[in-house]
Image (spheres, rainbow, N blue to C red):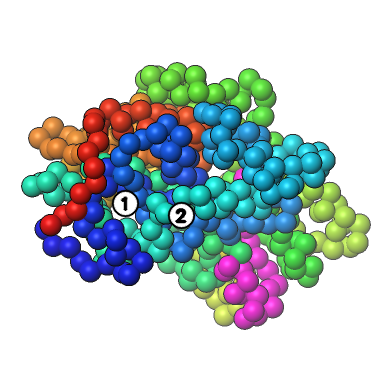
């Protein structure tokens, strides 16, 4: 097995065999790093992160936006409330505890929680190689080790992998061929918008979707660009209130994971039908109210800045001299309408789940090199163990491999990009890893 020359930054890691390599160092694998330390994992570990530093939702750091979950559902508290890595201790060590408590906020500001994530990540800097975007993952049959290659040409070796690549944005087919500087997903919102605003005066922007994020983007556009016309296109009748009933919120309890995981495929579909609006196509009351009052305020001033095209499906998106034109079909009357001269289109269209639907993927793209080795169901969707482990299909062999997140289809809504169960999932992976690796030997290097 050949080993590429590594950057000076990671020269000490060249050829080294790690007991576990985590791919991605966002909240999910940060929670795992905490668990490995606090539960005294004896083996060596390394995390590979494609960005130059740890970032959490950097393109959605909108003024006033919050995290939509209780601050104690952080990176560690549900597993170990005495940890130094709790959000509460972050506030204490940064001399903001009493000021934060005095805010009277139900949920912390998104910008402060992002700072908390970066603060925790800083404690594990020695275990992270940044600027390392993974390009291939292979198994060396001679050593039965994973060989992870990054875009720098570096190669890292491991007895086990924990993948936390983040969720894949949904780009509807109508927008597949559009210029990415003018038509972009919310995960690129602030950066792309700022670039456009430098190039031209923004006059008309469309926001596609009926979620919390769609409203937050519309509010940001309304406050930031007073002369801007904003058009929202959504399938629903109007922005729907999120289901935050205490009974529905049990989907974020650890017991629900077992209930959901052990349910039949048909039972899972039934659960999903009932619980869809706890997490999707819905928004919190505060942002709905702010948008509604803002639109009323505009009306009082004789303005018509925000238009909502409800019960609508997008048929096409085509370039024009002044930007893009959306062709929208009103599903109630089956009438088509064109929305011309759009300077930008922001896609608040969500993320892919695992499955066979039009917006699903059978496995995360990062697993493409291992796909033929993975155990799948009859539709080709990867099977995920209760301990988040992926198994090899019959006739193949794989070292221990885990998916830290992206497991909503198997483990339920607590896996839908929420912080709620991160720390408990990290514990489950730690326990399984320890069992799979057995007695860990000292780190070695590939000759």
Whether 104 is drawn above or below 428: the answer is below
Q: Is residue 193 left or right of residue 20?
A: right
Please say whether residue 53 is one of the residues in the magenta stretch: no
Q: Is residue 408 left or right of residue 91?
A: left
Magenta highlight range = 191-212
Q: Count all numbered tags in the image, as a single digit.
A: 2
Residue 434, image x, y percentages: 30, 31
Residue 45, image x, y percentages: 34, 46
Mark yes or no: residue 283 visible.
no
Q: Quadrant of residue 35?
A: top left
Q: Residues within 10 Å of mark 1 (few under 14, many from 20)?
A: some
Among the two numbered marks 1 and 2 on one chain, the one whose residue lies closer to the N terminus: 2
**Could you tell me how far apart the alpha carbons at marks 1 and 2 are, in whole angstroms?**
23 Å
* Residue at image location 88% in from the left, 55% down from the top: 297
Residue 90, image x, y percentages: 64, 44
Mark 1, mark 2: which one is toward the viewer? 2
Q: Quadrant of residue 51?
A: bottom left
| Numbered mark located on residue 366 in the image | 1
């Amino acid at each position: 097995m050949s080993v590429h020359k590594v950057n000076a930054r990671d020269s000490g890691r060249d050829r080294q065999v790690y007991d576990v390599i985590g791919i991605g160092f966002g909240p999910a694998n940060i929670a795992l790093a905490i668990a490995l330390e606090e539960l005294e994992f004896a083996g060596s570990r390394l995390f590979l992160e494609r960005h130059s530093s740890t970032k959490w939702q950097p393109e959605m750091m909108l003024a006033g936006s919050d995290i939509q979950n209780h601050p104690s559902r952080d990176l560690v508290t549900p597993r170990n409330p005495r940890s130094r890595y709790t959000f509460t201790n972050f506030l204490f060590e940064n001399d903001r505890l009493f000021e934060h408590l005095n805010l009277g906020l139900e949920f912390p500001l998104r910008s402060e929680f992002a700072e908390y994530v970066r603060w925790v990540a800083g404690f594990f800097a020695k275990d992270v190689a940044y600027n390392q975007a993974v390009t291939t993952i292979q198994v060396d049959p001679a050593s039965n080790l994973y060989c992870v290659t990054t875009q720098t040409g570096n190669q890292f070796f491991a007895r086990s992998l924990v993948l936390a690549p983040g969720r894949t944005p949904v780009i509807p087919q109508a927008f597949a061929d559009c210029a990415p500087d003018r038509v972009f997903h919310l995960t690129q919102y602030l950066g792309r918008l700022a670039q456009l605003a430098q190039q031209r005066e923004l006059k008309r922007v469309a926001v596609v979707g009926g979620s919390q994020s769609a409203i937050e983007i519309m509010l940001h556009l309304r406050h930031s660009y007073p002369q801007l016309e904003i058009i929202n296109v959504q399938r629903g009748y109007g922005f729907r209130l999120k289901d935050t009933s205490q009974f529905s919120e049990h989907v974020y309890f650890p017991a629900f994971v077992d209930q959901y995981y052990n349910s039949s495929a048909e039972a899972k579909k039934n659960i999903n039908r009932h619980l869809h609006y706890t997490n999707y196509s819905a928004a919190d009351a505060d942002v709905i109210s702010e948008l509604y009052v803002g639109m009323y305020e505009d009306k009082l001033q004789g303005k018509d800045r925000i238009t909502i095209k409800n019960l609508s499906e997008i048929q096409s998106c085509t370039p024009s001299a002044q930007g893009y034109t959306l062709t929208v079909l009103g599903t109630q009357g089956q009438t088509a309408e064109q929305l011309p001269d759009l300077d930008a289109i922001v896609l608040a269209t969500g993320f892919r789940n695992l499955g066979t639907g039009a917006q699903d993927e059978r496995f995360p793209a990062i697993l493409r090199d291992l796909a033929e080795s993975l155990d799948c169901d009859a539709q080709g969707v990867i099977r995920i163990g209760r301990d988040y482990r992926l198994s090899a299909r019959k006739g193949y062999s794989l070292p221990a491999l885990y998916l830290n997140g992206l497991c909503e289809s198997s483990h339920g809504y607590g896996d839908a990009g929420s912080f709620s169960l991160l720390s408990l999932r990290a514990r489950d992976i730690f326990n399984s890893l320890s069992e799979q690796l057995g007695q860990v030997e000292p780190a070695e290097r590939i000759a």
